[in-house]
Amino acid sequence: MRTQVAIVGAGPAGLVLSHLLALQGIESVVLEVRDREYVERRVRAGVLEQGTVDLLRATGVGERLDREGLVHHGIELRFEGERHRIPLSDLTGGRAITVYGQQEVVKDLIRARLEAGGQILFEAGAVGVDDIESSRPIVRYRQGGEIREIECDVVAGCDGSHGVCREAIPAGALGVFQKEYPFAWLGILATVAPSTEELIYAYHERGFALHSLRSPKLSRLYVQCRPGDALESWPDARIWDELHRRFALDGWSLAEGPIVDKSITPMRSLIVEPMRHGRLFLVGDAAHIVPPTGAKGLNLAVADARVLAEGLVEWYRTGRENLLDRYSDTCLRRVWRVEHFSWWMTSMLHRFDDDGPFEHRLHLSQLRYVCRSTAAATSLAENYVGLETV
Ligand code: RFL
Ligand code: PHB
């Protein structure tokens, strides 16, 4: 098989890229190791930046998002039994975030691609990428027990943090920057009306908690836990107990409901530089991971896909490579801004193992400052809704 752009991975990065290229008449084939149902059900991110929403809408995949997405103009920071609202839109000239599950974005994109005649091969896992320093790279993949090949002009490695594309780059050519955080998030999805209209980020001496949502009937909640914790050590009653304690506020209560999804995610940052080697471009989580506190991973994946699509369009139209040559530098400016913001939010809101009374007071002082100072709140808000330029 031959195509112009071989895209490995049908997550947000691969699907947005394939969609943007198709709109400009560039052909791609998307390889996805999982089946369609699995990809469309995987519960992950939920917060879309203004720029992500604008892009999906402008490219014809925003119809259901406009109908079902929940536009939020603020978030709440909760600590010491008090609530403080950060008015995101007031602080950013009207920008907002939209709560809409990542799997809904993925569903909308898969449908749009298939309806437009696009090729997504499910249960087709890439096993290797060859000849990326030549003008005819090859992706080998396994489908139905057979190894097959796609020859292409360019490979887009959109295969997430555990994919194979990153490994195709010679080790000496990549710089790797990483940080492990000494905690994880236990996330649940519960069929109960959210107890809040806006997201609540809570700092507590027992650790961080987050109240998010997916719809008027579905709540998404997270509690900080230990990275080595097993799910079995978190029976439902323990989860609700921790959530009640960490969100505790006079006159407010958290409604419980059946838990329908439960998972533990270790928190880490990882960035590889550069994000390109020869004809292989890394996009999204394949190139960088952020801790989820800033709600940035999906948005960053979409931002990379947009930059790569623009570079490829220029190259196919004019033969000029200058945008492609700048792909990695352009993306990495945003990546590092977002890594810093996510690290900052994470550090402010979580309990570290060796935190004592001194560190606790520093956390509280920082939080109070963010809530009282317009300058500090604006800095949080503009990063949270997504910076237009970095
Ligand atoms: P994905 O979504 O991991 O997609 C990669 C795809 O590649 C497939 N794949 C392969 N396919 C073919 N051959 C192979 N060899 C393959 N190996 C892998 C995989 O099956 C998969 O379908 O990466 P992508 O597209 O870069 O998208 C990144 C986002 O998924 C990720 O950054 C976000 O989910 C992170 N994230 C959040 N991001 C936000 O912007 N806002 C949030 O609110 C937010 N919350 C979160 C999050 C991530 C979380 N977890 C579970 C890590 C909350 C959590 C708890
Ligand atoms: C989510 O709704 O899953 C979510 C919201 C905000 C975050 C992370 C995850 O910072």
Image (spheres, rainbow, N blue to C red):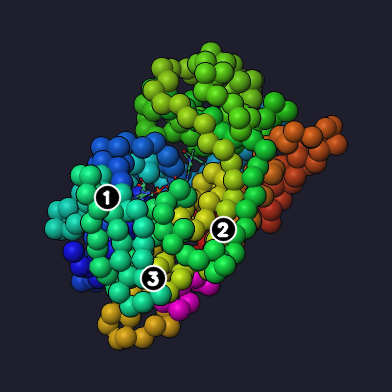
Residue 293 x/y as whole percent: 57, 43
Q: State yes or no: discs 3 and 2 in contact (Cβ < 8 Å).
A: no
Say left or right for 89 vs 159.
right
How far separated are the C-alphas under marks 3 and 2? 21 Å
Quadrant for the C terminus in the image: bottom right
Q: State yes or no: discs 2 and 1 in contact (Cβ < 8 Å).
A: no
Tell me, yes or no, whether the highlighted magenta stretch contains residue 233: no
Tell me, yes or no, whether the highlighted magenta stretch contains residue 326: yes
Residue indicated by mark 2:
271
Residue indicated by mark 1:
142
How far separated are the C-alphas under marks 2 and 1? 28 Å
Kindly indicate the quadrant of the structure image that contains residue 68. top left
How far separated are the C-alphas under marks 3 and 1? 19 Å
Residue indicated by mark 3:
132
Magenta segment boundaries in residue numbering: 324-333
Mark 1 residue's CB less than 8 Å from ligand 1: no
- Look at 45% across and 79% down and name the residue there: 325
- Look at 46% across and 71% down and name the residue there: 277
- Lower sequence index among marks 3 and 2: 3
Say left or right for 153 vs 272.
left
